[in-house]
Image (cartoon, grey):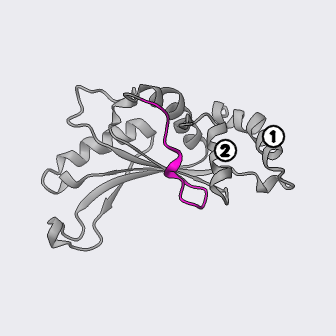
Amino acid sequence: MSQSRLKDFYQKSVISELKRQFNFKNVHQIPKLTKIVINIGLSEAKENIKVLDVAIAELATITGQKPLVCRAKRSVSNFKIRQGMPIGIKVTLRSAMMYEFLDRFINVAVPRIRDFRGIDPSGFDGQGNFNLGITEQYIFPEINIEKSDKARGMNITIVTTAKENEHAKALIGALGMPFKK
């Protein structure tokens, strides 16, 4: 299998750019992507279990990997949730699948967001990880709108080895993420 276009770009130009920009002495100080976690909360699954099947099929189509069903750890009577009920799904992407997904997300899906003015850079958590929320899954061209029952949002977490937000922002920005100025 050939190497991902984004990973090739990272190794050829981003590493040298980050090393020069932050004066890293050691190659291991240069931040890199560790994993991407995509999750969808399914609160409506407590009434209609078929929603779970549709959401699993859509997320599997988007990521190319079967999602894991997240179940409630304990019962919460205020939310009418019992222990063991499915409340969400998640996918963890690593290595080649991670780079393929990020490449498609940046170059294909993000330009399809309605009224897009750049991704808000306030999603960094202080330890080099970036979180962003998507309001609908229809920005991905793999999703067939006729077969989908409802627009669902998702949370995408990009985990890096960077120690500071500044390094992580430089890494993700160099990979092509269009941040707001």
Q: Is residue 123 magenta?
A: yes
In the figure, residue 88 lies in which quadrant? Answer: bottom left
Q: Give the range drawn in magenta.
A: 116-129
In terms of sequence position, does the residue under pointer 1 or pointer 2 come before the other?
A: 1
| Residue at 56% across, 51% down | 35
Q: Distance between the residues labelled 1 and 2?
A: 11 Å
Q: If the image is split into quadrants, where does the C terminus sit?
A: top right
Image check: 2 left or right of 85? Answer: right
Q: How busy is the neighbourhood of tag 2: few (under 14 within 10 Å), some, or many (20 plus)?
A: many
- Name the dominant secondary structure of the magenta segment: loop
Q: With respect to residue 162, does 20 lie above or below? A: above
- Residue under label 2: 171
The disc label shown at residue 16, or none: 1
Side of 88 where 6 appears, left or right: right
Is residue 4 in view? no
State whether residue 167 is above or below residue 135: below
Q: Where is residue 13 in the image (x, y as percent from the top left)?
A: 76, 34
- Report the front residue among 118 and 134: 118
Q: Is residue 127 magenta?
A: yes
Q: Which residue is drawn at 66% across and 56% down?
A: 161
What's the residue type where badge 1 is placed?
A: Ser
